[in-house]
Image: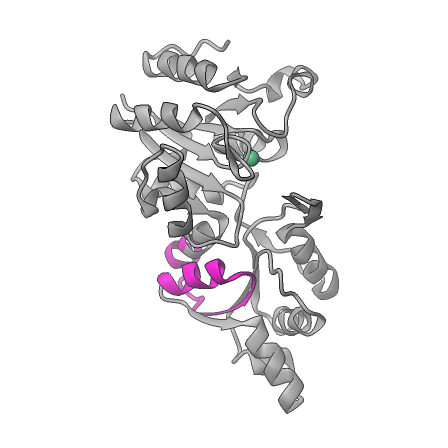
Amino acid sequence: MSLLLLVDLDGVVYRGADPVPGVAEVLADRASRGDDVVYVTNNSMHYRTDYVARLWAMGAPVSAERVVSSARATALHIANHEPSIRRVLVVGGGGLERELRDVGLDVVTSAHAATRMHQEGIDGYTAAGSPDAVVTGLDPALTYLRLAAANDCVRAGARFIATNRDPVYPTERGLRPGAGSIAAALEASSGVTPLSIGKPEAYLFESAAEAVGRSPAEAIVIGDGIGTDLAGAKTIGSRCVLMLTGITGPGEVDALPPERHPEAVAADAAELAAILERFAAGSDAAS
Ligand SMILES: [Mg+2]
């Protein structure tokens, strides 16, 4: 039985600009032996092909269909499960706009709506052309008027969908506001809680499994975050290999209550390879 591996990117395959030694090779080897490897990330800013060249360069050949960001998962979720949504106002990066257009949605940028509001003195809902939904991601060019446009739309009844609710975004200069902080601002002003697609909610993992025609429950989630990857794996009823190559240290795993523990913990690529070998052999024994 081939494995379905849903693999987080930052903190697992790479840390910022640097590859985590050996992990890409382990995943390339699993893929060459017939396992389904799908890369999943809460990052909402990039288009899926942006990741393909980077993963190839690190030694993990992958097709664009096997990279499912929270932006791609949001687009797939709307296309497959929300047929009444045709026009969306987007507060986010260019990659998010492109993912939404790819599934046939009529995308209005918050920049466009804000310009019309300013020039024509109209409300954000009218300026955006009465969208059915507002989608938020990380928007590095956020302004007050763009937020006001989104606010007007949600207050007028547009569906509020967040790509993810990560409060912070790690950069070389420290933790900056993440997509979740922007969603929180809109939630505060509109009084509406968004549907959130990214980890730890189930939708991102569900879209990733659907992308290769598999069921999320049979997945093995490989990630470095307790509140995102591990929590998301518990939500979809899948197994989790928690990597100690990113944001989580061994002490934090030990401190978890027994029912929250991952099925396995890997400190490096060699341990990951051994764990996956064991799973492939049909043994669920945790290390
Ligand atoms: Mg991570």
**At 47% across and 14% down in the image, what residue appears?**
271
Q: Is residue 240 magenta?
A: no
Quadrant of image for the N terminus: top left
In the displayed structure, 230 sits above or below 142; it is: above
**At 53% across and 44% down in the image, what residue appears?**
42
Q: Position of residue 130 (x, y in %)?
A: 53, 78
Q: Horizontal placement of 22 versus 244: left or right?
A: left
What's the image's color scheme? one colour
Q: Horizontal placement of 165 versus 28: left or right?
A: right
Task: List the single residue furthest toward the right.
Answer: 188
Q: Position of residue 2 (x, y in %)?
A: 28, 24
Q: Position of residue 136 (x, y in %)?
A: 58, 59
Residue 34 in sight in this render = no
Could you say which is closer to the camera, residue 230 or residue 273? Answer: 273
Q: Position of residue 180 (x, y in %)?
A: 65, 51
Q: Horizontal placement of 45 versus 166: left or right?
A: left
Q: Horizontal placement of 249 versus 90: left or right?
A: right
User: Based on the displayed image, in which of its 4 quarters is residue 259 positioned?
Assistant: top right
In the displayed structure, 18 sits above or below 242; it is: below
Task: List the single residue furthest toward the bottom.
Answer: 120
User: Based on the displayed image, in which of its 4 quarters is residue 67 positioned?
Assistant: top left
User: Based on the displayed image, in which of its 4 quarters is residue 66 positioned?
Assistant: top left
- Start and end of the magenta stretch? 76-102
In the displayed structure, 159 sits above or below 273; it is: below
**At 70% across and 49% down in the image, what residue appears?**
176
Quadrant of picture, ligand 1: top right
Counting every numbered tag in the picture gives 0
Could you say which is closer to the camera, residue 156 or residue 98? Answer: 98
